[in-house]
Amino acid sequence: MAVAPNETRSTLRALAAAALLALVAGPLSAASASAAAPDRPGHTSEAVSKSGSATSAVSGSALRRGLLRQLRYGGGAGGTWVQDLSSGKSLFKRSDRHALIIASNMKLFTTATALGRLGPKTRLPTELWAAGELDGSVVRGDLILRGGGDPLLDGKGVAKLGAKLVSSGVKRITGRLLYDDSVFDRKPYPPQQGITGGPYLGRLSGLSFLKGAPRQPARSAARALISNLRKRGVKLREGTEARATKPGLPNRELLNQVRSATIRELIAATNVPSDNFLAEMLIKAIGAGVSGRGTTAAGGKLVAAFARKRGADVSALNGSGLSRGVRASPRSIGRLLASMQADEKLSGPYLDSLAVAGRTGTLYDRMRGTAAEGNCRGKTGTLTGDSALSGYCMVGGRVLAFSILMNGVDIDRAHVAQDRMAALIARYRP
């Protein structure tokens, strides 16, 4: 599959609006800033010239006319949903119940579920166990390096494990170095036809290493640990190599562990640059953490169930949207956005995970010079011929949510239309 880079009630509403305004106007999170990268060249001049002044207000009727005009300009099969979340008023609907290809807008569902089911503060551990006895400074038996689904484990993380082992006083290991990646299944890619590795997706593993770049991530992580331990003066028996272990091997003692970034930080690292690898790791982590089955299918069922509870439907075949079978309607995406914004515990982390128009991530070079710049956050979605943009805008103290899905289109033309639509939404005043 050809893929382009990506993508009282009044009081509560007032508090939510104030919180959203602070997040949109405030400084970016560390995760958002570090992940900032352009997706495609922006269309700033066109967005401004075709939508009037960058800051002049538009009425509800003018908004509807403008959105319809731009939706038609985008061409293909498209649908749009726009709602004022502060009042609950629907501002625009067009083919909003039609299930369309959503591409990386799937990440909105995956990351929302990760927040809701795993929790914003949860971290995924990588552990080092002694299968044998710890006798003073000697581990008499095997070591087991056990993955917990951390998608960002790298050489620094492995080095921390080695340093912690040495600082605990261990100087010699009589057994082997085994690795256990069984928290996830051993399928390196989602089970949809045509989804393989390349520039947009590394190999998936319960013991990931270097974002799935090695052919055997778990084995590579274990080899890196062996090398690190030897450099630190730990004696391993001659010929020690990294070997896979069967799931359920008895553990005698947890020697140490390193933990991943929080789920809040991981979803930001997923959504801002539209990282397919992180999204696919997260959907397996959801399955493992909630049902004990670290598979794409198990995670997908949980994502779909989470969406249904929030009034939305999605065909969650994978976590990233790298499939034309991943579909939802603009209305479903809108309902998900509305429900997440209404959730006191999750609204802040969720909003902060989205790219800022004209400033960060896949929206870095889009909507600059328009009312949307700095005031809208969103998630892009791009497959060949399919484009999506969904998110939030802060409008005069109000929170507006929108979803724009376009199938069978020229991507550049679709981006122009979407940018003009977001700029119009950001200029709406009731």
Image (cartoon, rainbow, N blue to C red):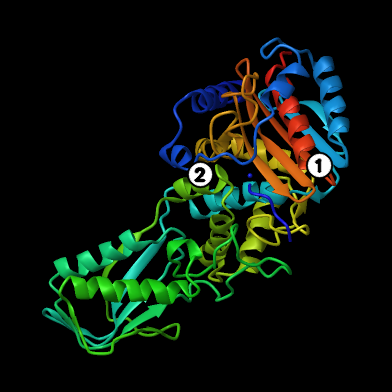
Q: In which image quadrant can residue 117 be found?
A: bottom right
Placement of 87 over or under 105, stated as above or below: above
| Quadrant of image for the N terminus | bottom right
Residue in the image at 20% along x and 71% along y = 231
Question: What amino acid is at disc 1?
Answer: Asp
Residue in the image at 57% along x and 71% along y = 188
Name the disc covering residue 65, or none: none
- Which label's residue is closer to the chain start, 1 or 2? 2
Report helix, strand or loop for mark 2: helix
Residue pointed to by mark 1: 410
Placement of 347 over or under 376, stated as above or below: below
Residue in the image at 71% along x and 62% along y = 317
Residue 153 locus on image (x, y percent): 40, 61
Q: In which image quadrant can residue 93 be found?
A: top right
Q: CA distance from mark 1 to mark 2?
A: 28 Å
Q: Is residue 336 visible?
A: yes
Report helix, strand or loop for mark 1: loop
The answer to which of 89 and 187 lies nearer the viewer is 187
The answer to which of 296 and 189 lies nearer the viewer is 189
Residue 169 locus on image (x, y percent): 12, 72
Q: Residues within 10 Å of mark 2 (few under 14, many from 20)?
A: many
Residue 92 locus on image (x, y percent): 82, 27
Is 357 left or right of 213, judged from the image as shown? right
Name the disc covering residue 268, or none: 2
Q: Residues within 10 Å of mark 1 (few under 14, many from 20)?
A: some
Placement of 125 over or under 250, stated as above or below: above
Residue in the image at 50% along x and 70% along y = 205
Is 64 left or right of 19, judged from the image as shown? right
